[in-house]
């Protein structure tokens, strides 16, 4: 997945295999969550995707301000 500017500049990306690895992790109930879920979403894929988009927006900010 990529976050790109209208001119084609890629400002953030994530490899599909890495994304799948992150979303396949199951938190251990006894020890507490192994990963933190963002924005209150309990689904790891939703949480990881939202975090990816937020990071992409932050990385694009300098390009949009100039």
Image (spheres, grey):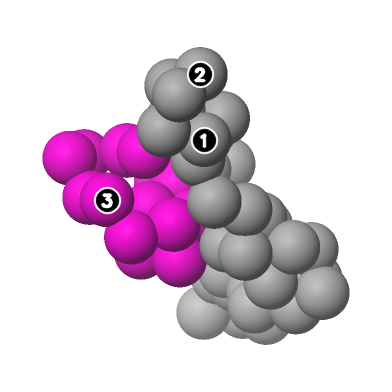
Q: Which residue does the numbered mark 2 point to in the structure image?
A: 31
Q: Which mark is residue 13?
A: none
Q: Which residue does the numbered mark 1 point to in the structure image?
A: 28
Task: Tell me if residue 3 comes above or below residue 38 in the rendering.
Answer: below
Determine the secondary structure under disc 3.
loop
Q: CA distance from mark 2 to mark 1?
A: 6 Å
Q: Quadrant of residue 22?
A: bottom right
Out of 1 and 41, give the one closest to the viewer: 41
Q: Note whether residue 41 is visible.
A: yes
Q: CA distance from mark 3 to mark 1?
A: 13 Å
Q: Earlier in the sequence, mark 3 or mark 2?
A: 2
Quadrant for the N terminus in the image: bottom right
- At label 2, counting other C-alpha atoms closer than 10 Å, the crowd grade (few under 14, some 14-19, many 20 or more) is few
Q: Is residue 44 magenta?
A: yes
Q: CA distance from mark 3 to mark 2?
A: 16 Å
- Residue located 22% across and 50% down the image: 41
Residues at marks 2 and 1 touching, judged by CB atoms closer than 8 Å? yes
Q: Quadrant of residue 46?
A: bottom left
Q: Which mark is residue 42?
A: 3
Out of 58 and 32, give the one closest to the viewer: 32
- At label 3, counting other C-alpha atoms closer than 10 Å, the crowd grade (few under 14, some 14-19, many 20 or more) is few
Out of 37 and 57, give the one closest to the viewer: 37
Left or right: where does residue 5 sit relative to residue 12? left
Q: Earlier in the sequence, mark 3 or mark 1?
A: 1
């Amino acid at each position: 997945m990529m976050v790109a500017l209208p001119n084609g500049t890629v400002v953030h990306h994530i490899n599909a295999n890495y994304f799948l690895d992150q979303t396949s992790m199951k938190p251990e109930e006894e020890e507490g969550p192994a990963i933190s879920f963002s924005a209150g979403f309990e689904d790891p894929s939703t949480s990881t995707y939202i975090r990816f988009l937020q990071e992409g927006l932050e990385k694009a900010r300098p390009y949009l301000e100039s």
